[in-house]
Image: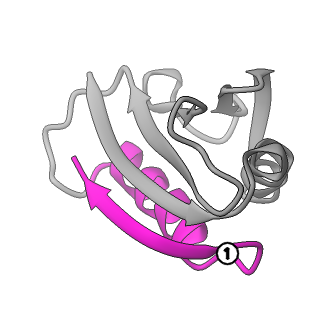
Amino acid sequence: MARYTCSFIVSVAIDHLQPLMIELLESSGLDVQYYTPDYIMAREAPGSIDFPKLVTVEILIDKTTATDLETRMTLVGKSAELPLKLDNHCRQVFDFIKQEIEHSRHWHLIQSLAG
């Protein structure tokens, strides 16, 4: 199973982060399947890629350390695909979402820490 993680600290109020992340994921071509105030799960739509390569993206929002000025969140990208190549489909989707988060106009990125 391919699995990639990255943590971020962004300068946005926690109340605004979830709807902004849902919008970012949907504009990136993912279908948001489930969300709560501190968790979002989105998936690639079946059809254009083999089923084991379909990527699931999870966003975990840390409400315990959030302030009005900054919020910590973790991005997890995973698929059933075995990561036999360094540049596999899951890694490509993960890197794209990571880049979208890092360059979003909706907040200022304070820190990005790849896992």
Q: Is residue 31 above or below residue 38?
A: below
Q: Is residue 100 magenta?
A: yes
Colour setup of the view: one colour
Q: Position of residue 103 (x, y in %)?
A: 58, 79
SS assignment at label 1: loop
Q: Position of residue 57 (x, y in %)?
A: 55, 35
Counting every numbered tag in the picture gives 1
Q: Residue at position x 59%, y 59% from top?
A: 70
Q: Position of residue 90 (x, y in %)?
A: 39, 43
- Relative to 94, is 33 on the left or the right? right
Q: Residue at position x 48%, y 53% from top?
A: 93
110 vs 44, nearest the viewer: 110
- Relative to 68, is 112 on the left or the right? left
Residue carrying label 1: 104
In magenta, the rendered stretch is: 88-115
Kindly identify the amino acid type of the residue bearing the numbered disc 1.
Ser
4 vs 113, nearest the viewer: 113
Q: Is residue 98 above or below residue 59?
A: below
Q: Is residue 114 magenta?
A: yes
Quick one: quadrant of the N terminus? top left
Q: Position of residue 31 (x, y in %)?
A: 78, 35
Q: Residue at position x 65%, y 31% from top?
A: 43
- Relative to 101, is 32 on the left or the right? right
